[in-house]
Image: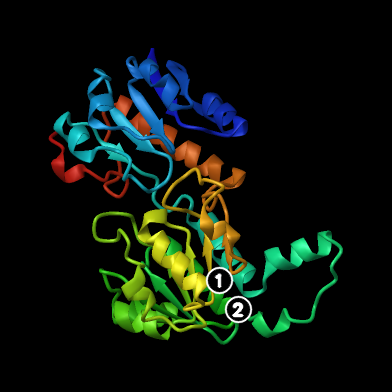
Amino acid sequence: MDVIALMGPYDPEVKTLIKRIAPKGFVIKEIPSTSELDNLGDANYVILRVLSLNEQLINSIPNLKLIQRWGVGYEKVDIKAASARNIPVAITPGMNAVSVSEMAVLLMLAVYRKLIQLHNNVVEGKWQQEGITSTSYTINGKTVGLIGFGSIGKLVTQKVKAFGADVQYYDVFRLSTDEEKKLGVKYVDLEQLLKTSDIISLHVPFNDTTRHLICKDTIELMKPSAIIINTARGAIIKEDDLLEALRSHKIMGAGLDCLEKEPADRSNPLFQLDNIVVTPHMGGSTIDISVSMAKRCIENIVKISQGQDLSKRDIVNAEYLTN
C-alpha cells in the first residue's frame, strides 16, 4: 500500500474528495500541523499545503517519491534537498489562477469603494454617505500595472479591461509584440510601471529577487493616489515600509491577501488603518477550484507510481533530476 501524506490544513470537503478520488492501493494519512510531523516517515507521496518541508524532514522520509504542492508556490520546500535525493517537486500551475485573479479584482474594488468601512458603518447604524464619495473611485479609466504576467496576470487583465481599465505589465519574460497586441496590454519597465499605474497588482513568485520588491524606494516612485494589491506572497512587500506609506498617505491604499507573517498577529499595526483591506491568504481557495486541484495532485501521484513522466510545466526541479 502506498501512503499519501496530506500535509497541512485542508477543509473537510477537500479531504473527503481526495480520499474518494485516490485509486485503490493508496492510503491517505493526515498530517494537519507541525505537531504531527513525526508521522511522515512512511509516506511515499506528500501533498503539501502551508507547512514546510526542510532538509531534515525530507531526509527522514526514506521512501518519498514525490512532493506535490497544493498550488504554485514552492518556497517552503527545500528544493536542493529534494533534488539531492532525486525527488520531483511538483506544483499545479494555472489551477487556481481564476480564483486568485478574482480575489485581486475583489481587493481592488474593496479598497477603491471603501467596502469594509461602508459595511461597518451600516451594521453600526451609521447610514453615512457624506465624506465617502470624495475618496471612492472606479476601476474604469484607470491604469492597472501588473508586476508578473503569468496565468493569473493574464486573467486579471481580462477582468479589469472589462471594467474599462488600461493595462500595462512588467515581467522578466516579455511577451511577443503579437501577444501584447492580442491581449491589449503594454510592456513597460518596472520603474515606469510604478510611476504611472493607478493600481499596482503583484503576481510574481517569491524568491530572492522578489523579496521586498515593494519597499520604501519603490513606493516613493508611486502616485499618491496609487493602491497596491498583493495576492502573491507577503514578503514581496516590506511591511514596515508599507505601513509608513499608508499612515502618511504617500499612497492611497492597499489590498492584501497575504502578509509577511502568517497566520497574522492581531496586533499587526496595519490592522489599525482604514485604508487597507486584508484577507487570510484565501485567493486560491474555493471549493470549485479545489476539486480541480485535488484531481491534478492525484493524477501526478498516480503517474509517478506508474513510472510515467510528469509535465515539465509541473516540475520545478526537473533540471536537477536524473532518470
Q: Amino acid at mark 2?
A: Phe
**Height in image: 301 above or below 256?**
above
Q: To which residue does mark 1 refer?
A: 159
Return the x and y of residue 134 as percentages of the image width and height.
68, 85
Secondary element under disc 1, as helix, strand or loop, is helix
Per the image, label 2 sits on a secondary structure element best described as loop
Label 1 neighbour load within 10 Å: few <14, some 14-19, many 20+: some
256 over 2 or under it: above or below: below
Q: Residue at x 52, y 71 (%)?
A: 247
User: 293 or 205: which is nearer to us?
Assistant: 205
Q: Nearer the viewer, residue 116 or 17?
A: 116
Q: Residue at x 51, y 77 (%)?
A: 249
Q: Position of residue 286 (x, y in %)?
A: 59, 47
The answer to whether any part of residue 280 appears in the image is yes
> Looking at this view, is 291 or 187 the one in front?
187
Dot 2 and dot 1 residues touching (CB under 8 Å): yes
Is disc 2 surrounded by few (<14), some (14 to 19) or many (20+) residues within 10 Å? few
> Seen in the image, is 49 located left or right of residue 44?
right
